Image (cartoon, rainbow, N blue to C red):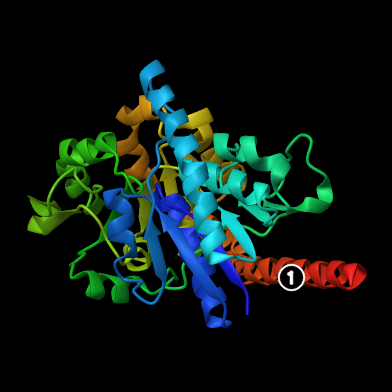
Amino acid sequence: MSKIIIACGGTGGHLAPGIAVAEVLQARGHDCLLLISKKQVDSALVEKYSHLEFRKTPGRAFSGGLLERMAFLLSLFSGFFTARRLLQQEKPDLVLLFGGFLSLGLGLASKALRIPVVLHEANCRPGRAVRVIKRFADRLYLPEGMRLSGIPPERIRYLGYPVRKEIKHCLKAEAWKRLGITVPNKLLVVIGGSQGATALNDWVTHNFAQLAQAGISVYCVTGLGNSSSSTMHEIGANGVDIMAKFVPFSNSMGDVISAADLVVSRAGAGSIAEIIRCRAPSILIPYPYAADDHQQANALALEQRGAGLLLSQNQLKKLTSEVIDLMFNDWLLAKFKSNLERLDRFNSSERIASDLLALCDARRIAQAEKFESVT
């Protein structure tokens, strides 16, 4: 039996794939400890996974002005020694890092203690944590086609983004029933990522009347802290009641995305992976202030594969007409769905779990051989 520590907190895009891999490892009889942040989004997301072991750890992102960056360096210094103590207590066979501020201290401490380090980069442009730790990593999981300078090809695997097992495609009517909504005609789902997107929430509020006239209902996941649950109503064509439902958070994203005829979403790697798994045509609006503009790169990659459309946030005035045009373009929607199905070609969680366990086995064999040579 192997023991693996997984650092995956801070955003849903880091935490969700950590959960996905941990569930596979646990099902195979291995132990996992997942390190998460103290953010509200982490607490909300892990609530339904009581069968997994989570531990909240402090940390700060590398952002802001001089004082904030100095605070980050102090946090990193403290995090290194905290991680070192944790590793000495838990004695894992391997650590798996999903990027973000929780990865740095743990990655450096793991290398100091000669524990194998594995990095997973979900975005089409690598984050700061990955760029710092990449040369220490024994294995790197990257998006297809990405290269990292200075990294030998034999350390890299292209195994995709692990999606939680409950995120799966289902019939729209089944999803509507489980979500408790009535859809007279078409449904638009709007997702701002785990943090929410005020620009997209405001767009729904200001343009719902026009969408309703076209027969389009809306289900909007606003993000924790952005609003409470609420509902808007408009009378559409032929006197039909059309609804826009706003929810701050959903623990049933498979149903939410599967319910949609069309999705409007930010372009985080996690959101895109779940859109692909649920075969949902989408218009992606990258967050313009994302680090290294990685959401733009993610959205462009999906558009180039013929599986969605990219629209910049500074073009939001065009979004309503784009939604209405695409929503009733059955030929293009069918093309997107076909390409989405082609992109979802294997189970990333299973493949990554198998590779991690192979690395653990290789470490044990190397340790045994070293012991035999000494004795």
- Residue 208, image x, y percentages: 18, 43
> For this rendering, which residue is in front, 366 or 223?
366
Q: Residue at x 45, y 57 (%)?
A: 275
Q: Is residue 278 left or right of residue 173?
A: right
Residue tagged by mark 1?
Answer: 358
Q: Could you say which is closer to the camera, residue 329 or residue 368? A: 368
Label 1 packing within 10 angstroms: few (<14), some (14-19), many (20+): few
Relative to 141, 366 lies left or right: right
Figure quadrant of the C terminus: bottom right
State which quadrant residue 288 falls in: top left
Q: Is residue 252 left or right of residue 20?
A: left
Tag count: 1
Identify which residue is drawn at 63% across, 69% down.
Answer: 353
Query: From where the camera sits, is residue 228 visible?
Result: yes
Quarter of the figure that contains the N terminus: bottom right
Most extreme residue toward the right, as rendered?
373
Question: What residue lies at 53% left-to-right and 29% top-to-bottom?
Answer: 292
Judging from the image, what secondary structure is the residue with disc 1 in?
helix
Q: Residue 91, how many percent across, how many down?
A: 59, 65
Establish if 171 lies above or below 157: below
Residue 185 lies, in percent from the top left, at 24, 61
Badge 1 amino acid: Ala
Q: Does residue 121 appear in the picture of this structure?
A: no
Query: Which residue lies most toward the front here?
Result: 375
Q: Of residues 304 and 130, which is closer to you in this image?
A: 130
Residue 133 or 255: which is nearer the viewer? 133
**Residue at x-position 33% and y-position 68%:** 255
Where does the image place residue 146, in percent across and percent down from the top left? 70, 42
Asked where in the image residue 52 lies, by quadrant, the reply is bottom left
